Amino acid sequence: IDDEYAAQKLNEFAFWLNNREGRPFTAIIDGANVAYYMQNFDKGCFNFHQIQFVVDALEKSHEHPLVILPYKYCTDSFMVSMGVKNFRQSLSAEEKYILENLTRKGQLYRVPSRCLDDYYWMLASVSDQTKSRNGKSLDVSHDDDKNRWPGTRPMLITNDQMRDHKLGLLEPRLF
């Protein structure tokens, strides 16, 4: 990965998040992580229906989700690597509709190729979303009149343990 290119694209995403108009995002979804959840069986695949299920559940709970998805999963077919099996997955008409619908609703961010999607959902989960938030707090109190889950917003939906990022967060030690 070209570090300069990746940094430029991540900065463009940060600018977009802070300067976009419309409702602020109250939930950030690690799309790849959600789609691969519990798919390590013989017929497992990248499951777009799981992403849609999470989006629907969040919207029903009065949240406004943003799905972060690597660019390759937004194409008509892509390679999937699951353990020892590798195969090409082609999108069905239903899966294409899920992507088109998320795009139309402004709830899908396609991470550019050659960029690590983890950085995008991490950044989105701590972004101020300055313009769309318009100075208002996104946090939800315990006595919310819509019975939303209380706490800080945006919330992050992922199962990623971030093992591959922990070493990068530690300060170097002199031995």
Image: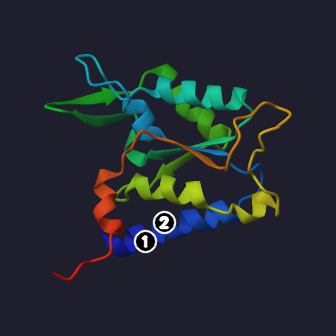
**Placement of the N terminus among the 4 image quadrants:** bottom left
Assign a secondary structure to mark 1. helix
Residue placed furthest toward the right: 145
- Residue labelled with disc 2: 10
Q: Is residue 81 left or right of residue 133?
A: left
Q: Are marks 2 and 1 in contact (CB under 8 Å)?
A: yes
Picture quadrant of residue 172: bottom left
Compared with residue 132, is residue 34 higher up or lower down, i.e. above or below? above
Residue 75 in sight: no
Question: Disc 2 and disc 1: Cα gap in Å?
Answer: 5 Å
Query: How many other residues sit within 10 Å of disc 1, few (<14), some (14-19) or many (≥20)?
Result: few
Q: Position of residue 72 (x, y in %)?
A: 37, 44
- Residue labelled with disc 1: 7
Compared with residue 70, is residue 59 higher up or lower down, i.e. above or below? above
For the point 35% across and 24% down, the residue is 38
Q: Nearer the viewer, residue 60 or 94?
A: 60
Query: What amino acid type is highlighted by mark number 1?
Result: Ala
For the point 27% across and 16% down, the residue is 43
Tally the marks. 2
Compared with residue 78, is residue 126 higher up or lower down, i.e. above or below? below
Q: Nearer the viewer, residue 114 or 66?
A: 66
Q: Position of residue 35 (x, y in %)?
A: 42, 31
Query: What amino acid type is highlighted by mark number 2?
Result: Leu
Q: Position of residue 128 (x, y in %)?
A: 67, 63
Assign a secondary structure to mark 2. helix
For the point 74% across and 34% down, the residue is 148
Picture quadrant of residue 5: bottom left
Residue placed furthest toward the top: 43
Query: How many other residues sit within 10 Å of disc 2, few (<14), some (14-19) or many (≥20)?
Result: many
Compared with residue 31, is residue 61 higher up or lower down, i.e. above or below? above
For the point 77% across and 58% down, the residue is 133
